Image (cartoon, rainbow, N blue to C red):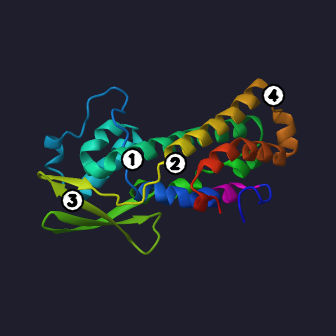
């Protein structure tokens, strides 16, 4: 069943529609050149040279949580970094828009309505960048390493791969990047912000949405449709 054919989606349905894209987004290759709030990179090659494979992944998680994308560059293999960071930045833009809208709806509409529209549960399934991730162990063979990790305490354990380049361990997300992803996620974020702007301005009545949560869900679906249509075709099924 496609997005356009589905009934009015709950938050779970929105998550199901977007989860394949998120899994792809973090198993591919990407980095946003020059992004990072104007601060100098914290993870210089010299500093990164003393980090173990597991510590590299922990540092990447920390930097991503701060949206310090430029500092992540030295810790991702060159061939993958621009696409990886570009896509992560776009996903984070969408997650921020989702949080802002959900927070406003909880305060000014109802908790039930916010639960019906929030899509961020799938942020728990972003591989090493998942919301609840624990790194368990590492194996090193020459200039290759594997780090096992667990997402949300679920089994089986997953494996992240790294390569040592000029003495520095770098994360290799692997192939699979699709260039449509960043623009699509930014478009999805803009759609959610349009809904938030409509609620704040009164163009979309908070009182009506409280009485009829499906009205809000329909509006979210409408605003997300342009971004969803930009996603790779397989992710919309």
Instruction: Please tell me whether mark 1 sits on a helix, a strand or a loop.
Output: helix
Q: Which mark is residue 203?
A: 4
* Residue at screen point 25% across, 36% down: 42
| Residue pointed to by mark 2 | 180
Residue 125 percent coordinates (x, y): 50, 59
Separation of marks 2 and 4 at Cα, in angstroms? 31 Å
Q: Nearer the viewer, residue 166 or 10?
A: 166
Instruction: Please tell me whether mark 4 sits on a helix, a strand or a loop.
Output: loop
Magenta segment range? Answer: 9-15
Quadrant that contains the C terminus: bottom right
* Classed neighbour count for the residue bearing mark 1: other residues with Cα under 10 Å, few (<14), some (14–19), many (≥20): many
Separation of marks 1 and 4 at Cα, in angstroms? 37 Å
Tell me the mark number nearer the camera, choosing from 2 and 3.
2
Quadrant that contains the N terminus: bottom right
The answer to which of marks 1 and 4 sits earlier in the sequence is 1
The answer to which of marks 2 and 4 sits earlier in the sequence is 2
Task: Answer with left or right where residue 38 lies relative to residue 165.
Answer: right
| Residue pointed to by mark 3 | 163
What predominant SS class does the magenta segment belong to?
helix
* Residue at screen point 53% across, 42% down: 183
Separation of marks 3 and 1 at Cα, in angstroms? 18 Å
* Residue at screen point 63% across, 61% down: 16
The answer to which of marks 4 and 3 sits earlier in the sequence is 3
Residue 51 in magenta? no
Residue 143 percent coordinates (x, y): 15, 63
Q: Nearer the viewer, residue 83 or 70?
A: 83
Asked if 74 appears above or below 237 in the picture, the reply is above
| Residue pointed to by mark 1 | 83
Question: Is residue 76 in view from this perspective?
Answer: no
């Amino acid at each position: 069943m496609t997005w356009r054919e589905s009934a009015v989606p709950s938050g779970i349905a929105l998550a199901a529609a977007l989860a394949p894209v998120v899994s792809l987004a973090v198993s591919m290759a990407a980095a946003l050149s020059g992004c990072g709030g104007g601060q100098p990179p914290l993870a210089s090659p010299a500093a990164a040279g003393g980090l173990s494979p597991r510590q590299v992944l922990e540092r990447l998680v920390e930097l991503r949580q701060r949206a310090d994308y430029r500092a992540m560059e030295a810790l991702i293999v060159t061939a993958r970094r621009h696409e990886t960071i570009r896509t992560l930045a776009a996903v984070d833009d969408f997650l921020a828009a989702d949080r802002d809208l959900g927070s406003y709806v909880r305060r000014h509409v109802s908790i039930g309505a916010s639960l019906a529209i929030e899509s961020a549960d799938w942020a728990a399934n972003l591989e090493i960048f998942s919301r609840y991730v624990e790194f368990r162990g590492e194996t090193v063979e020459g200039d290759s390493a594997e780090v096992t990790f667990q997402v949300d305490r679920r089994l089986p354990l997953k494996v992240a791969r790294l390569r040592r380049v000029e003495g520095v361990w770098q994360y290799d997300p692997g192939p699979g990047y699709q260039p449509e992803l960043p623009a699509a996620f930014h478009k999805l974020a803009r759609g959610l912000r349009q809904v938030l702007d409509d609620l704040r301005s009164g163009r979309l009545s908070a009182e009506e949405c409280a009485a009829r949560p499906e009205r809000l869900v329909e509006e979210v679906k409408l605003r997300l449709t342009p971004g969803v249509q930009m996603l790779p075709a397989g992710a919309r099924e």
